[in-house]
Image: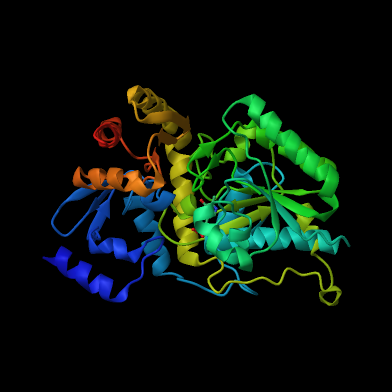
Amino acid sequence: MKNEELKIRDLDVLWHPCTQMKDHERLPLIPIKKAHGIYLEDFEQKRYIDAISSWWVNLFGHTNEYINKKIKEQLDTLEHVILAGFTHEQVVRLSERLVQLTPEGLDKCFYSDNGSSAVEVALKMSFHAHRNDGITKPLFVSLTNSYHGETIGALSVGDVELYKETYEPLLLQTIQTPVPKDMSIESADEAADLFEDLCKKRADEISAIIIEPLIQGAGYMHMYHPRFVVRLREICDRYNVHLIADEVMVGFGRTGELFACQKAGITPDFLVLSKGLTGGYLPLSVVLTSNDVYAKFYCDYNEHKAFLHSHSYTGNALACAAANATLDIFENEDIIEKNREKAAYMAQKLKAFEGLSNVKEVRQTGMVCAVELKGYSAEERIGLKVYQYGLDHGVLLRPLGHIVYFMPPYIITNDEIDIMMDTAYEAIKQLP
Ligand SMILES: *Cc1c(COP(=O)(O)O)cnc(C)c1O
């Protein structure tokens, strides 16, 4: 009953993200009453495996006992305080830990409250750092097929047509350089050479290149070799261009290391984190940078070099408590090692998909698996059919176009991986 009532009341007053609302004339909304572990549950006790970690944010399950406890403790102590002129224990601890855990040479943390705004921070900081050096570099480079969020600046460095096309007249001028076309070393080198050619011509205008290391998430789970990131680091150093690593999606263990840059063994000039940062509980994001960049802004007030950027909820104490609890779990439970076993198990299961006639390719990087379908037009909305099949069978899959992917919370068991992937297999097999 409650299910039906909430659907009606919802459509009366809500406008949902990333949704053509008319679809809901036939596609029912799903009210969720509660969630625990990898399961979401509606008001009629129907359960769904959250195979996409609720838009890639959840790491250790819903209503995780430990994270809940830590947030509740914080709630009775300090919920929030202005971060200009003030500080608090959770944000200090979190920053110390992030500096410790991220690649060597990232020494300072600047907070905001979602991935897009953190991307904006990194872009502004990069531009401003060059400016404080006396050089104006008004251009940003990003990769073809990239996604960095949907505020105006973040959208400007993105390249997924679906999100960008309409707003093109509003956006900043940016340049896209080709992403490696597949996961081979050769294509990594090929793409790096093209970026180097661009730098040869225009490096004096380019503040930074922003990338999603190893996996382009919203860009249909496109994956490439770490070698590309290694090469970009060298090129950026040679041409005085910053490297911004947007690890909003790939950070916190998704690729098999805690941070994707560690797979390339490099340190970016700016590291952008959000999504998994709070274990999927609360909005929080952070940009880490070097003491070197920080020093360019550090001077007397009247020199007008300060980074005057602010968000009301910067460094929210509850969100920082959730983030510290999340890092505790990484620390105490050897998650990265356990994920290696789970990733290997998923790799085994993924092979079966290659035998389906409508599968073009399967690919995997760490805890992210993707199955690319072939032979369908966009109008067929094949992803929607897989989504619907999944829901009917108790699994939340949310394909990106014709890419069915798996990005479950890390607490998923092998038995649950079986259900998740077998359901997707059947969903793909029964497609027309
Ligand atoms: C989701 C995402 C963003 C944007 O984060 P929001 O919190 O949704 O604004 C930016 N970059 C990448 C790589 C993302 O996956």
Residue shown at 46% from the left, 55% from the top: 278
- Compared to 108, does 362 lie above or below? above
Q: Dividing the picture into quarters, in which one does residue 100 lie?
A: top right
Q: Is residue 107 visible?
A: no
Q: Residue furthest left?
A: 1
Left or right of 5: which side holds 73?
Answer: right
Residue shown at 40% from the left, 63% from the top: 17
Q: Which color scheme does this rendered protein use?
A: rainbow
Quarter that holds the N terminus? bottom left
Image x and y of residue 129, in percent: 79, 60
Q: Dividing the picture into quarters, in which one does residue 351 lie?
A: top left
Quarter that holds the C terminus? top left
Residue shown at 37% from the left, 61% from the top: 19
Image x and y of residue 85, in percent: 65, 75
Image x and y of residue 423, in percent: 25, 36
Left or right of 30: which side holds 171?
Answer: right
- Compared to 157, does 101 lie above or below? above
Image x and y of residue 13, in percent: 30, 76
Left or right of 426: which side holds 308?
Answer: right
Q: Is residue 382 visible?
A: yes
